Image (cartoon, rainbow, N blue to C red):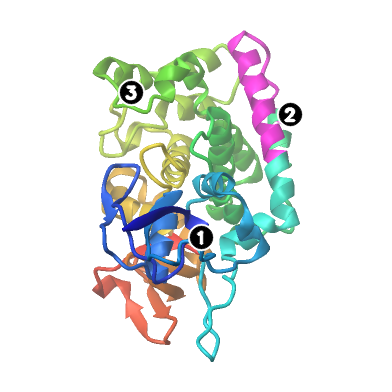
Amino acid sequence: MNVKEYSVNELVPGMIIAAPVITNAGQILLDVGVTLTRPLIEKIAFYQIPSVTIEVVTGTEEKEPEKKEPEAKETAEKKADFFTQNSLLHYEQKTSTNGTSQAAEPSYSQKVKKSAAFQKFQVDFSFSANDLKNIFDSIVAGGAIDTKDMLKKVTSLLKPEQTTIDFFDMLHNLRSVNDSIYAHCINVSLISRMIGIWLKLPQADIDTLTIAGLLHDIGKTQIPDDILNKKERLTDEEFALIRKHPVFGYDILKKHELDVRILKATLMHHERCDGSGYPLALKEGDIDDFALIVAIADVYDAMTAARIYRAPLCPFEVIAEFEKEGLQKYKPKYILTFLEHIATTYQNNRVMLSNGESAKIVLLNQQVFSKPLVQLTDGSCIDLNRSPLYIKAII
């Protein structure tokens, strides 16, 4: 049997797997002998697997793979990097009336990434992250904190014409495995600001909340990069050190004249209403409200970001995680407001289900936001609240 390595963008339905397809976590996704279908190719792409070993039938070794749009002609190395940057990338193969295959239609995510608005946001965000690094370095060295300047740098990333969907599209498509502390802090700042708007807080409070989100992880600057970015399992000592970052951050900021809610958000953003958080194991009545809001933004951003050991979770998977424990760990008013608005953001969006099928969200479930009613491409509908299926990706 002859075999050949194909990059993900070269895979087409009908190819036969010649070697196990294994995820970054070491799990077998597809075994030898499996015939590829479009949903299976989508799964391979979703799990960020850059190439697959395919069985080549004798006499057809030189056969060219299915022709794609110009973008799909990138080198395997560049495409693999693209999948790492955006594991929600998804291709849908169209079939014409005479049964011949046509070029893949760009996914929604691809369209977003190609837009002029996204490309500008990407550049502006990069400059803002670099600026924030310089600001953190200055603060740690004892420099003054100019909250007005910091607020201006962050809010300049938001445009008046942007909708909520535009905003989250930008954040979700700007992902990379190596998201820095600074990128994360900007994301949490912007998401916290959005939550403040949804809660209809006074403008002054929304601005203060934005700064609280921006500074919440400054304590991580005191932890060595080789521990923060360690791929292997952390030792007990390393884990204990990372859990001290809220205290490190509080100690850095308490020397400055800041709104006390900013200081408390820095110290308490890992506290949970049921007392299961750290560093003080506080319960709801003792945790500052801004800390409770920043906590939600912090967890959402971390879970929807790519990690060395996993692909980024789909917003609906994160919603499901919040629903499992949200009412115990997070303030009900804040978490329910957040979940409803996030779910509503994706009303009418196309999604990929856990079985690889494509569907459209047609009706939200107000009791279980992670389980909406979806419509398949054949027109039939599935109530995910009555099905073992779940939403795996926004496409």
Q: Residue beneath label 3, please? A: 279
The three-letter code of the residue at mark 2 reads: Asp
Q: How many neighbours does mark 2 have within 10 angstroms: few (below 14), some (14-19), or many (20 or more)?
A: few
Residue at the far front: name it: 59
Is residue 221 rendered to the left or right of residue 163? left
Given the image, on which type of amino acid does mark 1 rest? Answer: Glu
Numbered-mark total:
3
Tell me, yes or no, if residue 107 can be seen here. Answer: yes
Q: Is residue 362 above or below residue 257?
A: below
Quickly name the residue at label 1. 10
Depth-wise, is mark 2 or mark 1 nearer the camera? 1
Q: Which of the two residues, 209 or 260, is positioned nearer the viewer here?
A: 209
Circle 2/circle 1 CB separation < 8 Å: no
Q: Earlier in the sequence, mark 2 or mark 3?
A: 2
Report helix, strand or loop for mark 2.
helix
Measured from the top left, where is residue 188 in percent x and y? 53, 39
Q: Amino acid at mark 3?
A: Pro
Specify whether residue 144 is painted magenta.
Answer: yes
- Regarding residue 336, the answer to whether it shows in the image is no
- Using the numbered discs, state the Cα–Cα distance from disc 2 to disc 1 in whole angstroms: 48 Å
| Residue topped by disc 2 | 149
Magenta-drawn stretch contains 129: yes
Residue at (26% x, 51% y) in the render: 28
